[in-house]
Amino acid sequence: MHSDYLAYDAIGLAELVRTGEASARELLDIAISRTEAVNPAINAIVLKDYDAARQRASRDDANRANGAHSADSRADGVGHGALAGVPFLIKDLGAPVAGLRMAMGSRHYRHFIPAEDAPVVALAKAAGLNIFAKTSTSELGQMPYTEPELFGACRNPWNLDHTPGGSSGGAAAAVAAGIVPLAHASDGGGSIRIPASCCGLFGLKPSRGRVPGASPSAAAGELGIDHAVSRSVRDSALLLDLLGGNADRPAGAPGTFLSAAREPCKPLNIAYVTEPMLAPSLSADARAALADAAQLASSLGHNIEPVSLGIDFAAVRHAFLTIWSVTAEDMVLNADRITGRKPLRTEFEISTWAMAHVGRKLGERGLPAALEEQRRITERLTGLLSRYDVILCATLAAAPIKIGEMQPTAVERMQMRAITAMPLEPLMKKMLTEASNKAFAWAGCTEVFNLSGQPAMSMPLYWNARGLPVGVQFAARDGGEATLLRLAAQLEAARPWFDRRPPLLQARS
């Protein structure tokens, strides 16, 4: 089984457990063994809960052997037991697991132990997924790369010198490295799609409100939502059923997302967007990935029409940053509401601390205008998607950047310290512009769909000459996940990626 583990997605592993070809304990032991083998290189796992997971797996195996299946541990592929026995990872941000530390990449939160499960965690457990560890994230999900000072940089299995993206970088690195086929992730500005693009995975951000509960980044403006990164389209489809309202229906029943992923995809009218959005330009890699995806979709019978989104991207940038800064203020300067302890400057990275102060000084005052701009952006995209079935655009402006490439310089850190000590509005605006220019130059193509709330996915259809994955993004109408999943499954069949393995994984398989 050890050598075959990578040949299965989560649905395949659950089938092995259901038929008795493998036990839940056996799968968990393999996942733990793979963690111990590869995590020293990628630094994706920041909390281990092996003993409790082993007890759950052994108990479930005993119940299965005795023919006793509880309501939340059914093995017939129906409802809550559809992924019974599959090892699972939870992102260490915004998805509390009762009794497990939730540091969120922050020194302030490093001793915070939630008392209750988040809704998404409760649903994952009900699905039979066995949570055995938590994955790394940027501090409070603030950055599109995963290099928290608390835990150190998380690395990309395709090239250890490069980022796996963020903020769900640990989840994506773990899946790409073969620890699990599917891992929890969340997306408040691209944090599912960015790491999926960096790590050669499928990443679907569902429609706003599809999955109950919210990440911290989903406060003002409701930007964030939970779901996953996966190696197969069907795994993400089934998990969306289990998390998003179809948990009590048989897996793959008509009208479910898994059923959609199995259905033929009719010819679609695709709006082909080559605008860099919040980035100043798209790299040659990003343009090549887009052109390749457009050609592939056209060869499958879809109508590709170049269009402009017709959006004021400067306004998008301002609205997003305003909402984001207010969320940072809440998570940093009001952290005592969660932890019961006064937040201290030394407990947060300087960029996070500075963004929180921007939120207090500028964000609160500008929030009403930002929310109005969000409404206009949503209206514009809704109108465009009434004429097209989906939008095709870049996920990132370039291939995965190198570790440390976007970290604040010494001068930038000095400026950030200055504005928190002396919060003058002109200085704050200057710092925010410079910092956002750096981030958006690489990761400025996903935020618009968080503002609009429409579903969007990153697909691993292209690798550049250096062997790094470069995803492309598709978005659909609000509630249009089924359309995206039909298209994703068709593209997956036409351009399979499941058996593509990064050098790290090949060396340690």
Image (cartoon, rainbow, N blue to C red):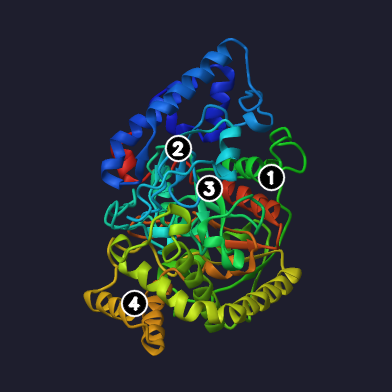
Residue identified by numbered label 3 = 228
Q: Residue at x 56, y 82 (%)?
A: 315
Q: Residue furthest top?
A: 66
Cα distance between the residues tagged 1 and 2: 32 Å
Q: Amino acid at mark 3?
A: Ala
Q: Amino acid at mark 1?
A: Phe
In this orientation, which residue lies closer to the viewer: 153 or 325? 325
In terms of sequence position, does the residue under pointer 3 or pointer 4 come before the other? 3
Task: Select label 1 or label 2 by which is in front.
Answer: 2
Cα distance between the residues tagged 2 and 4: 34 Å
Check disc 3 and report its element: helix, strand or loop.
strand
Q: Residue at x 63, y 19 (%)?
A: 69
In terms of sequence position, does the residue under pointer 3 or pointer 2 come before the other? 2
Residue 99: mark:
2
Q: Amino acid at mark 2?
A: Gly
Q: Quadrant of residue 6?
A: top left
Task: Select label 3 or label 2 by which is in front.
Answer: 2
